[in-house]
Amino acid sequence: AAGADLVAEIPAWFALQSAEGFARAGVRLLQCCGVTHMSFGSESGDIDELSQLA
């Protein structure tokens, strides 16, 4: 799919949860698929702020 290595659909139950629940489901899904590294982008660009929020 446009150069993607993996395309996954998060079940509706998790997609309807809070942002934290949605994110947790996505990370868990990737772990179950054997993914060991993730990358993301941010509009903020402030790594210190992102680290505090994590």
Image (cartoon, rainbow, N blue to C red):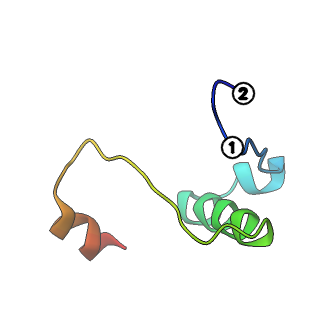
Q: Residues within 10 Å of mark 2 (few under 14, many from 20)?
A: few
Q: What residue occupies the far top of the structure in this picture?
A: 2
Where does label 1 land, which residue?
Answer: 5
Element at badge 2?
Answer: loop
Q: Amino acid at mark 2?
A: Ala
Compared across the picture, whether 40 is left or right of 19 comes to left
- The picture quadrant where one finds residue 46 is bottom left
In this rendered view, identify the residue nearer to me: 20 or 6: 6
Compared across the picture, whether 46 is left or right of 28 comes to left
In this rendered view, identify the residue nearer to me: 51 or 34: 34
Q: Percent x, y for residue 21?
A: 63, 65
Rendered residue at 79%/65% (across/down)? 33
Where does label 2 land, which residue?
Answer: 1
Exactly how many numbered labels are in the figure?
A: 2
Compared across the picture, whether 51 is left or right of 32 comes to left
Q: Percent x, y for residue 17?
A: 68, 57
Element at badge 1?
Answer: loop
Q: Amino acid at mark 1?
A: Asp
Q: Residues within 10 Å of mark 1 (few under 14, many from 20)?
A: few
- The picture quadrant where one finds residue 3 is top right
Q: Percent x, y for residue 44?
A: 21, 48
> Looking at the image, is 36 positioned above or below residue 41?
below
The label shown at residue 19 is none
> Looking at the image, is 19 positioned above or below residue 1?
below
* Quadrant where the C terminus is found in the figure: bottom left
Q: Percent x, y for residue 49?
A: 19, 66
* Quadrant where the N terminus is found in the figure: top right
Rendered residue at 61%/72% (across/down)? 36
Q: How far is disc 2 from disc 1 in space, using C-alphas?
A: 8 Å
Rendered residue at 55%/65% (across/down)? 20
